[in-house]
Amino acid sequence: MRPRLLVLAAAGLALAACTMIPPYERPQAPVPADWSGPAVEPTPAPSSLPASEVPWSEALTDRRLRSVVELALANNRDLRIAALNVDRVRSLYQIQRSELYPAVGAMASGDVYRLPASMSESGRSKTVEQYSVQLGTLSWELDFFGRIRSLEASALEQYLATEQARAAAHISLVAAVASSYLALAADVESLAISQATLAAYRESAELIRHSRDAGVASDLDLAQVSSQVDAARAAVAAFSGRVATGRNALELLAGAPVPTDLLPDALTTVTELAELAAGLPSEALLSRPDILAAEHQLIAANARIGAARAAFFPSISLTAGAGTMSADLSGLFGAGSGTWTFSPQILAPIFASGSLRANLRTSELDREIALVEYEKAIQGAFREVSDGLTLRSTLREQRAAEETLVQDLERAVRLSDARYQAGIDSYLAVLIAERSLFAAQQSLVNVRLAEQVNLLNLYKALGGGGPIAGPADQPSDPSGGAAAGSAAADRAPWP
């Protein structure tokens, strides 16, 4: 029995190296080779590495912002869920991988029953006892056609996809915290501008009131400046609410209260993000974690086709055991009580009402869906990077224009006030100039925020956060060994 078992096992191992998984080739990226839009002037880069290999701690140059990001990485619940999902899928992969190997166990049993007189050879009823111990019970499905190995390959790709999803969640959290921090800094600066403007309007209203009482200014001048005070009060109230809600949003992302000394006091005091090098080819998108995750899902769907194909062929399983058996408990381990069993089984599908073909068709459609999802992820990433590069130059130009506009309006306010004090113009000219200056100051804050957020989104769109191996590289086995069997042999064409 043992030689036959060894021969069958060796044959099973030899044939199991071949699967029916279709050969996988990375699809052609459905995007142009270069980015569209106006050319971007080269700017100094923080390093010679691609953006995908620049750590976030180097891209975010502000010390307080880095501290808040570290707080979020340690306490954010969504990131914790992503890490737990990786552990969960790793366990599922280990369960699937274990089906490749024999299951060995031990079993002990005892039967005591009464045999009636009509069933006894002696014509008398008697009590029958039977005890057995199976010291080595082996159960093994010989994976001749690669069904189990196909499922194991799919489970491995699912695990790798989950790892990439966790990396994408990590990058998204860093970007979300930085974006929320910058937005809070902009609101704090806008609130300070509104408060300073309100104080200036109140001072002007008090001076005009005294001038009106002295018969120099008119009631119209007082009404106009009072309207400015009310508008500034409304702006202060609005930005106060935005600062409060912005802090709540930042603490939600951080997963813990953010210390006061880490909160921004103005957007201008936040150190700008490091510049990224321009002119990267669109192939750089393939290193993004979300795209890698979509590709792993595509490979997993491709592997499930192999399992669906193998279901058309017979499945062969072996069950064997060795132990002792005795009619009484005391003789269970005595001489001559040894026993063994060997039960090979072949199950071949003959008629399944089309379910096997439907299952194969479903697997092929799943692969097509995964392919479309993969292409969709690449196209979405291409648009994000293309938009970011396009806005990069226009926002820089817009900020320069807004800074010049604020300087011109500050000069216009001084000149209008001087002409009003000299009695040359009415207060309406001062009112118009001050309104324009306040609006330009708020617009400048928004443009600075948009420029920083655009650079942050560009860093995220290029997969910033660190190098991550792609599916073409040799994947690691989450069970602790090399996954060469599942990464190479399992992707071979079916025989």
Image (spheres, helix red, strand yellow):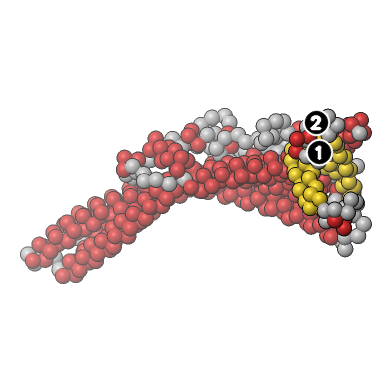
Q: Residue at x 48, y 47 (%)?
A: 77
Q: Is residue 112 above or below residue 479?
A: below
Q: Is residue 44 left or right of residue 32?
A: left
Of residues 312 and 43, the one nearer the viewer is 312
Question: Pointer 2: what residue?
Answer: 334
Could you say where residue 92 lies in the image, as x and y percent from the top left?
67, 44
Q: Residues within 10 Å of mark 2 (few under 14, many from 20)?
A: few
Residue 167 image-quadrant placement: top right
Residue 227 image-quadrant placement: bottom left
The amino acid type found where label 1 is placed reads Ser
Could you say where residue 294 lies in the image, as x and y percent from the top left?
67, 47
Quarter of the image that includes the N terminus: top right
Q: Is residue 225 above or below residue 182?
A: below
Q: Residue at x 72, y 31 (%)?
A: 482
Could you say where residue 438 lies in the image, as x and y percent from the top left?
31, 56
Task: Assess whether mark 2 and mark 1 are in contact (beta carbons under 8 angstroms).
Answer: yes
The number of discs equals: 2
The amino acid type found where label 2 is placed reads Gly
Q: Can the viewer see residue 48?
A: yes
Q: Secondary structure at mark 2?
A: loop
Closer to the chain start, of discs 1 and 2, is: 1
Could you say where residue 391 lies in the image, as x and y percent from the top left?
53, 48
Of residues 417 and 352, the one nearer the viewer is 352
Q: Residue at x 83, y 56 (%)?
A: 116
Spatial separation of the CA atoms under disc 1 and disc 2: 8 Å
Q: Is residue 343 left or right of residue 434?
A: right
Question: Pointer 1: what residue?
Answer: 326
